[in-house]
Image (tube, coloured by chain):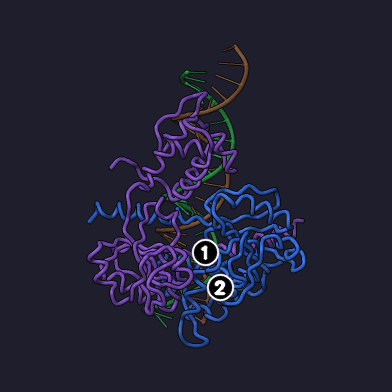
Chain colours: A blue, B purple, C brown, D green
DNA sequence: TAGATTGTTAATCGATTAACAATC
DNA sequence: TAGATTGTTAATCGATTAACAATC
């Protein structure tokens, strides 16, 4: 399928590069790894190596084409195709995700939300919110590939099991629990606690320095 | 100040251990590194090393005290003290964060939200939403230490500058942009694009295997 | 004693950085 | 040519894993 394996570390940087490149003004311009590195606070050698891995050869003196880079990164990250997804949990957080329009640029097509007890029938942007009972039928009928979990921690494992039994093999989990899934099911958990902790620890460390 | 430096990798695992330990039933029980490793799908040697770094010595045959471990992790991550914080951006996402009650357990005390044009004066849970013009006074009066950015990407840098000039030295950014800040300001950015990309790439990789 | 647990020391792996050579 | 850029190869750093010894 082309595209050799890239490291996890690089995978984390690619979206950062992409955002930066897209935010640059002007058409058809060239940009050097050095300039990107400076803008994003990274090492220039690292940026150069990263870009070499996912794009063709650059040219001395001129750098790389901005447009080409954007195209290559998007192709690599597969942001151009779409994956049909649903959310379980229509609380404030679930609904915020449901209506977050930027996901479309990342290939994530969130088509509906499910809740144990839907208060409203649709979100602010007009996406449908169904009762959880309709999950199985919906998933099979619409060929859903990603399930997003936005329910309280105590319900997350049950929802996860439900999603798996509905034939969903990829789960994006926002509840603060470690979910157990059968082999072959892919899981990705967000953990805001890590961010809060690292931010606060760094603050505490800096206090001593000042 | 105790607590030697721990690695970034360990910092990411500590909240996972903490969640798991808290979810265990029963009082005053002991638990072995092996059991934790099995439950969380990690290597037992790694768990043992991790725990040794942040806690005292374990006992052969009996393992470690669950309660002691919880205490040590919370102490290490400093989840027991509180940091006064505010959010800028009262959109669906900002409000979801504002009302997310779990942050209190992580030492994050979000006291108010600010918006360019507040539609409501308070959130669902009753936290105040002010006009952005009141930001500076509020920050100084209430000694705010963390600013959370939940505005669209195009406004994020301006909001960030505003926060810094209000004396806030730690920023938690949810907008998909790289923010530039003066030396001494700590920044932590969430990037959902990384998660979406890695989930979808893994799916694509698995397709070939099946 | 045997076995479940601990901890430690050395080997491996992965990623970053540094030093260099090549090109327009 | 000089300098800005590229790429490559080797050195360093950090984290994980494996092998072993110690203890209750």
Name the element at disc 2.
loop
Q: Chain of mark 2?
A: A
User: Could you tell whether A116 is left or right of A61 in the image?
Assistant: right
Q: Which image quadrant for residue D3?
A: bottom left
Q: Position of residue A7 (x, y in %)?
A: 57, 58
Give yes or no for contact between labels 1 and 2 (Cβ–Cβ under 8 Å): no
Is residue A43 or residue A201 the one in the foreground?
Answer: A201
Along the viewing direction, whichever of A13 and A205 lies nearer the viewer: A205
Looking at the rendered structure, the secondary structure element under dot 1 is helix
Q: CA distance from mark 1 to mark 2?
A: 10 Å
Q: Quadrant of residue B109?
A: bottom left
In terms of depth relative to the viewer, which is nearer, C17 or A106?
A106
The residue labelled by disc 2 is A99
Q: Is residue B164 above or below residue B34?
A: below
Instruction: Look at the image and tell me whether residue A56 can be seen.
Output: no
Quarter of the image with the C terminus of chain A in it: bottom left
Left or right of B9? Residue A145 is right
Write down the residue under mark 1. A93
Residue pictured at 24% horizontal, 71% vertical: B137
Q: Position of residue B37 (x, y in %)?
A: 56, 39
* Upstream in sequence: badge 1 or badge 2: 1
Q: Does mark 2 fall on the same chain as mark 1?
A: yes
Residue B108 can be seen in this image: yes
């Amino acid at each position: 399928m082309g595209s050799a394996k890239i490291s996890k570390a690089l995978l984390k940087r690619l979206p950062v590069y992409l955002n930066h490149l897209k935010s640059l003004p002007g058409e058809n311009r060239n940009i050097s790894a050095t300039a990107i590195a400076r803008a994003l606070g990274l090492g220039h050698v690292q940026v150069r190596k990263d870009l070499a891995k996912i794009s063709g050869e650059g040219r001395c003196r001129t750098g790389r084409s901005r447009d080409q880079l954007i195209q290559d990164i998007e192709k690599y990250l597969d942001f151009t195709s779409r994956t049909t997804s649903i959310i379980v949990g229509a609380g404030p957080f679930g609904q915020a995700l449901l209506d977050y329009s930027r996901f479309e640029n990342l290939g994530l097509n969130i088509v509906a939300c499910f809740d144990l007890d839907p208060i409203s029938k649709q979100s602010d942007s007009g996406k449908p919110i169904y009762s959880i009972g309709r999950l199985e039928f919906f998933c099979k009928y619409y060929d859903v590939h990603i399930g997003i979990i936005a329910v309280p921690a105590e319900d997350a494992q049950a929802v996860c099991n439900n999603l798996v039994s509905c034939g969903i093999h990829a789960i994006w989990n926002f509840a603060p629990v470690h979910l157990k899934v059968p082999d072959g099911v892919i899981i990705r958990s967000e953990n805001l606690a890590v961010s809060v902790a690292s931010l606060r620890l760094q603050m505490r460390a800096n206090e001593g320095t000042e």
